[in-house]
């Protein structure tokens, strides 16, 4: 793949847009995923820290959010410190989160009654400044609310992850509305590779980057987070074509 064309005018325009969106300030640190086929597609080679990100599940995962939650847990697991996790339903499966590398003794749980309370708790956690990350289950996320969360994250350097979940599939259309999040991800469970013996192989996800500031959307098949929070590149994908390993996603 050829290097992107560098245009001073385009760079200046991106800088102005970033300033309008609240992206001005010191350069953001990043957290690499440790998968070169994924990191090379992200600005500065990793997930930007100290800002807001959105993650949702695809298909049935739009409601249960299992794969999306484990994806978020894997990110939080690789950041040092305590993690605040805010939910509206008492259905966070701690053993599953731990399998993604985030041990229960690092998680502070907050059960709130609705999206409004969850967003308030998330903003308070981001402004605290002593947490590694704040994850919050939320169905609706307006531009105003997301901008407040993004600015709160930038003010302290704490990473925020809005875990988008809905009661019904029809409500997932809200995921297409614009927000101030730095990136927007969709994580869907897909069949794992068959094993030569009886058993179930490592879970596999289709990870889609639907939106990224100053970046392009794409999707890639990856093995789910392991006990250290790291994703893996399946052997059959690593040995396939570039189109299979990282397809551009349009529409």
Image (spheres, rainbow, N blue to C red):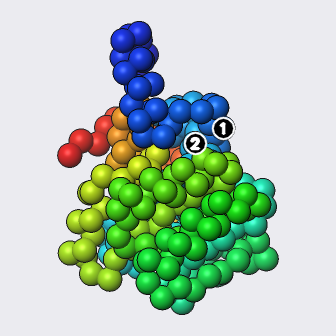
Question: Mark 2 falls on what kind of element?
Answer: strand
Tell me if mark 2 has few (under 14), some (14-19) or many (20+) residues whose alpha carbon lies within 10 angstroms of its own. Answer: many
Marks 2/1 in contact by CB < 8 Å: the verdict is: yes
User: In the rendering, at what x and y percent does residue 152 appear?
Assistant: 58, 54
Look at 57% across and 86% down and name the residue there: 111
Look at 50% across and 37% down and name the residue there: 23
Residue 29 disc label: 1
Q: Nearer the viewer, residue 222 or 197?
A: 222
Q: Is residue 218 left or right of residue 67?
A: left
Q: Is residue 99 visible?
A: no
Q: Is residue 183 left or right of residue 198?
A: left
The residue at which mark 2 appears reads as 48
Gap between marks 2 and 1 measured at Cα: 6 Å
User: In the rendering, at what x and y percent does residue 177 appear?
Assistant: 27, 57
Q: Quadrant location of the N terminus?
A: top left
Q: Name the N-terminal-most of marks 2 and 1.
A: 1
User: In the rendering, at what x and y percent does residue 232 appear?
Assistant: 58, 51
User: In the rendering, at what x and y percent does residue 215 appear?
Assistant: 40, 33
């Amino acid at each position: 793949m050829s290097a992107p064309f560098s245009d001073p005018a385009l760079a200046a325009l991106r800088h102005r847009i970033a300033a309008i969106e609240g992206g001005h300030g010191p350069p953001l640190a990043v957290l690499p995923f440790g998968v070169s086929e994924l990191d090379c597609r992200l600005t500065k080679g990793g997930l930007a820290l100290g800002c807001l990100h959105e993650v949702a599940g695809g298909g049935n995962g739009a409601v249960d959010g299992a794969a999306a939650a484990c994806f978020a847990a894997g990110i939080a697991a690789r950041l040092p410190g305590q993690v605040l996790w805010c939910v509206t339903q008492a259905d966070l499966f701690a053993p599953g989160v731990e399998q993604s590398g985030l041990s229960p003794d690092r998680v502070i749980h907050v059960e709130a009654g609705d999206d409004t309370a969850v967003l308030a708790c998330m903003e308070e956690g981001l402004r605290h400044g002593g947490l590694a990350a704040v994850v919050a289950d939320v169905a609706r996320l307006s531009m105003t609310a997301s901008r407040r969360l993004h600015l709160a994250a930038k003010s302290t350097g704490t990473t925020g992850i809005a875990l988008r979940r809905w009661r019904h599939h029809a409500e997932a259309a809200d995921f297409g509305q614009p927000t101030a999040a730095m990136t927007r991800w969709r994580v869907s469970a897909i069949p794992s590779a068959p094993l030569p013996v009886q058993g179930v192989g490592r879970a596999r996800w289709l990870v889609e980057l639907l939106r990224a500031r100053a970046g392009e959307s794409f999707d890639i098949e990856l093995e789910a987070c392991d006990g250290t929070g790291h994703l893996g590149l399946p052997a059959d994908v690593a040995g396939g074509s570039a189109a299979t390993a990282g397809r551009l996603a349009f529409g």
